[in-house]
Amino acid sequence: MLHSPIQIDALIIGAGPVGLFQVFELGLLEIKAHVIDSLPEIGGQCIELYPDKPIYDIPAIPVCTGRELTQNLLKQIEPFGAQFHLGQEVTELKPQADGRFLVSTSKDEHFLSKTIFIAAGVGAFQPRVLNLEGLDVFNDSQVFYRVKHPEQFANKNLVICGGGDAALDWALHFADIASSVTLIHRRDDFKAAPKSITKMRELCAANKMRLLIGQITGYETRDDRLTEVVFKDVDGKPQLITLDDLLIFFGLSPKLGPITDWGLEIDRKQITVDTQKFQTSIPGIYAVGDINVYPGKKKLILSGFHEAALAAFAAAEYLNPEKQIQLQYTTTSPKLHKVLGVKSPTFE
């Protein structure tokens, strides 16, 4: 049974940095937004992939972490009262006869929105798994593809798989607090920060962690607990490695999911847009950030911020075609100061 939909002017799909800045740009134009995200917390890729890693290319911020960037954006959009609907995926988007869009989610929420802003990054992320039959029964008890509570791994015997930043970052993090850390990668070549690779090799030389080159091919259990993994080196020689927990960082596989069924023009898993409005092939639907593609596209957060600004102005004109939308500056505009809830400065 369809519940009465929430009737709104703007719905943003994606609560990453670009989606959050879209809230800000719409707010300046007095367009209130609701935000949906498949993840259980706000922040998108920044929180999911590198919450504590430094970002150096945000204008006027020499360095910040993904977590800090998210927190600052949330503080910036506070005046606009955006409502967030987290831990749910948009399952259906249907254009209506009156020009609005009926949107349904996996939690049976429904929205009737005049405009849609797709800021879904590269899609919903799913971890690439270690394909061993039956291993999934230990997911989130002894097998982990994400670290949400680092303290739970203190004083444990850990096996960490992977050769990227996530694998090395967590291996280095746990080297001092776990009972033991064994890092396994299929080859002695890592796609991680050079400083992290150097530090990892130093710790291995000092016997504070262990590096094994090869792959896990099986596992052993006892009393319904994962007790060992079967490791084979590059020569095919097997050995058993005792462990308490297995952490796997093979990367994340982005999936567009239901977006492919919305009737949008898509090119290589990205949504095509124009560079004036960042509108998709369907009027009233905009795509900003890594989800879109156009000639010269660069997948940078700052590019997404620019796209969000132009999409907001385009949407304001779409919502009020009879009204002239004027560009105003937050430095000098009393109207924007009122919207932001700040006192207008006096210039001498």
Image (cartoon, grey):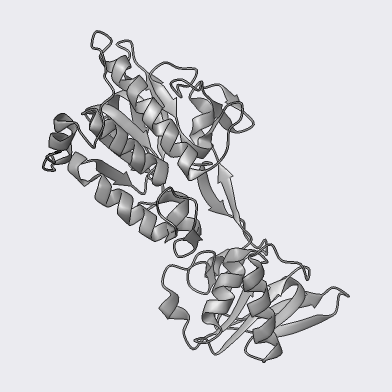
Q: Residue furthest front?
A: 348
Asked if 160 appears above or below 273 in the picture, the reply is below
Q: What residue is rendered at 32% in x and 49% in y? A: 73
Q: Is residue 345 left or right of residue 261?
A: left
Residue in front for this viewpoint, 314 or 250: 314
Return the x and y of residue 86 as percentages of the image width and height.
33, 47
Q: Is residue 20 left or right of residue 274?
A: left
Q: Is residue 108 visible?
A: no
Q: What residue is rendered at 52% in x and 49% in y? A: 125
Return the x and y of residue 246 as percentages of the image width and height.
58, 74
Name which quarter of the figure residue 241 lies in.
Answer: bottom right
Q: What residue is rendered at 58% in x and 81% in y? A: 158
Quarter of the image with the N terminus in it: top left
Residue in front for this viewpoint, 24 or 345: 345
Residue in front for this viewpoint, 293 or 239: 293
Return the x and y of residue 340 as percentages of the image width and height.
17, 39
Asked if 35 appears above or below 166 in the picture, the reply is above
